[in-house]
């Protein structure tokens, strides 16, 4: 242990008590209010974090508002700081991934990958920011602007609020903070209460790397309590939020005239056509359904398979699912950990039980022990069941039979979401026709959806959100266009 993180937590009877970062200082909630952070794999208390109130939120926003300027954090310094942060992140990888695994229950192989991807994001967003030179637009093309030209540049928005979910405790928050700071904004960030620690560690790294005091503020606490003062603040210029559709819609209703970037829930369909390579489809779809126990916005959440290949597909999917075994998340051989909390287990149980009562058949799994839900495959799911329409966020593969391409497309497009989808076919023309007709923001052909570092843009349509994530696209979301027009007399 390097001691780098000593300043962000104190020990209270052996339990670490983490602090908020405001105005460049680590500080507890003034009345000492905290909430518990528990390991979902063991139930063990691992830390406490501040239960912030609207007062701390207002203070953090005020500080951020007074700080964001190119004088405080000049562009060339931002590039240096992000490079230094990448090295510090990698140097402290073991401690960060151990804490991330404990707070989230994600297998250690996944949290190591998440940390590595966050390092790549630091590197690649730097490069994208450097390419933001703007545009020159000649006016000659139009009579109105004949002796004019315009220079169009991207400018920071001001104070950006970054709210992130539990499922990628480090990466999603970082993927908001990094482009926001590089583009010249100040940030007030709030991680999910199930997994608040990883983002606090990341904030410490950015501070050590040289982010000036007040440019990045991180507060923990219940979203239902401190969400409102963040959303309704006149001094917050933009909200970048990743989380559930329910909360995203609340933000859209409350925020008023702010720029909104909302990455919300999904219900990815995997369409398996009768000419697909079924071994490959089964392997990819199991990965899409079961990795991170299905707690991914881009998780495959329903399989639409053509009748003639259904039995063959099921046989292969059952075999491929054996690779996913529940176990201790700290063990490098574990492929699946627990769900995040009891509420998540109850929701998955309700959907699976409801489907069974309406005639679905469980081919494997369907059980849980504590928070560990077994990989589950459900046959004979019909398109009107809740499990065919709602986001599951658990390791369940509902199989729905479709007649042909048109039928697959119509079922695929019948849900409220529109984030991801995928098509498996041996005929590229056929797959492209399907992909073009799907309502999702991103469609993958012959692979399960996976967003990685954000090299390709992604984001939702319908109730899956507003805006696009990605190396360049996130910078676009966190800046605004500024046009200067020059006239020659
Ligand atoms: P969530 O319950 O919506 O929480 C997300 C964040 O919002 C948390 O920080 C939460 O704080 C906060 N929050 C809760 N209530 C709030 C309120 N009234 N006002 C403002 N903020 C509030 O989501 P989650 O359960 O953590 O994450 C799972 C969801 O995220 C899934 O629906 C998944 O599809 C979605 N997701 C989407 C993407 C994407 O790219 N589209 C990626 C990952 C996840 P507390 O923790 O304190 O409640
Ligand atoms: Mg939650």
Image (cartoon, helix red, strand yellow):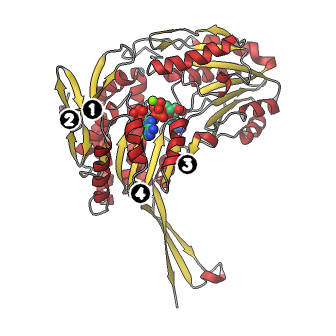
Looking at the image, is mark 1 or mark 4 earlier in the sequence? Answer: 1
Q: Which mark is residue 130?
A: 4
Viewer-nearest of labels 4 and 3? 3
- Nearest to N terminus: mark 3 or mark 2: 2
Check the image and report above or below for 434 versus 134.
above
The residue singled out by tag 2 in the image is: 4
Q: Position of residue 50 (x, y in %)?
A: 27, 33
| Left or right: 159 in relation to 84 | right
Q: Give the mark, 1 or 3, whose residue is nearer the N terminus.
A: 1
Q: Quadrant for ligand 2?
A: top left
Foreground disc of the pair 1, 3? 3
Say the numbered circle drawn on residue 467. Answer: 3
The kind of secondary structure element at disc 4 is helix
Between marks 3 and 2, how big is the CA–CA gap? 36 Å
Q: Secondary structure at mark 3?
A: loop
Q: Residues within 10 Å of mark 4 (few under 14, many from 20)?
A: few
Residue drawn 56% across the image and 34% down it? 265
Q: Are marks 1 and 2 in contact (CB under 8 Å)?
A: yes
């Amino acid at each position: 242990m390097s001691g780098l993180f000593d300043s962000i937590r104190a020990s209270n009877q052996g339990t670490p008590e983490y602090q908020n970062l405001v105005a460049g200082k680590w500080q507890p909630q003034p009345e000492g209010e905290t909430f518990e952070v528990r390991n979902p794999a063991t139930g063990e208390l691992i830390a406490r974090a501040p239960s912030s109130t609207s007062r701390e939120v207002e203070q953090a926003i005020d500080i951020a508002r007074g700080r964001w300027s190119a004088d405080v954090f000049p562009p060339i310094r931002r590039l240096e700081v992000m490079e230094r942060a990448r090295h510090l992140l990698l140097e402290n990888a073991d401690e960060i991934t151990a804490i991330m695994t404990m707070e989230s229950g994600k297998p250690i192989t996944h949290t190591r990958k998440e940390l590595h991807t966050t390092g790549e994001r630091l590197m690649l967003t730097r490069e994208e920011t450097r390419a933001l030179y703007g545009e020159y637009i000649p006016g000659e093309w139009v009579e109105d602007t004949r002796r004019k030209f315009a220079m169009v540049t991207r400018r920071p928005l001001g104070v950006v609020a970054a709210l992130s979910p539990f499922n990628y405790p480090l990466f999603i928050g970082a993927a908001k903070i990094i482009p926001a700071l590089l583009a010249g904004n100040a940030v007030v960030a709030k991680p999910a209460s199930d997994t608040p620690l990883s983002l606090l560690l990341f904030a410490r790294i950015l501070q050590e790397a040289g982010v000036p005091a007040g440019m990045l503020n991180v507060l923990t606490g219940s979203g239902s309590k401190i969400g409102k003062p963040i959303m309704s603040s006149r001094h917050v210029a933009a909200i970048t939020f990743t989380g559930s559709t329910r909360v995203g819609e609340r933000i859209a209703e409350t925020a008023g005239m702010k720029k909104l970037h909302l990455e919300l829930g999904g219900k990815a369909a995997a369409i398996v056509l009768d000419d697909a390579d079924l071994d490959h489809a089964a392997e990819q779809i199991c990965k899409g359904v079961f990795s991170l126990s299905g707690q991914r916005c881009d998780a495959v959440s329903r399989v639409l398979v053509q009748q003639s290949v259904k039995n063959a597909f099921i046989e292969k999917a059952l075999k491929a699912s054996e690779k996913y075994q529940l176990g201790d998340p700290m063990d490098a051989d574990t492929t699946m950990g627990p769900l995040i909390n009891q509420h998540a287990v109850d929701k998955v149980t309700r959907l699976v039980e409801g489907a069974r009562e309406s005639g679905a058949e469980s081919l494997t799994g369907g059980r849980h022990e504590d928070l560990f839900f077994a990989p589950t495959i459900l046959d004979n799911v019909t398109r009107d069941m809740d499990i065919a329409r709602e986001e599951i966020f658990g390791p369940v593969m509902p199989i729905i039979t479709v007649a042909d391409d048109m039928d697959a497309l119509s079922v695929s497009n019948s849900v409220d979401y529109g984030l991801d989808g995928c098509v498996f076919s041996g005929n590229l023309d056929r797959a492209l026709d399907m992909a073009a007709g799907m309502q999702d923001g991103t469609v993958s052909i012959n692979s399960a959806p996976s967003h990685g570092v954000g090299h390709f843009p992604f984001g939702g349509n319908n109730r899956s959100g507003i805006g696009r994530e990605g190396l360049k696209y996130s910078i676009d979301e966190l800046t605004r266009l500024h046009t200067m027009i020059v006239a020659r007399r």
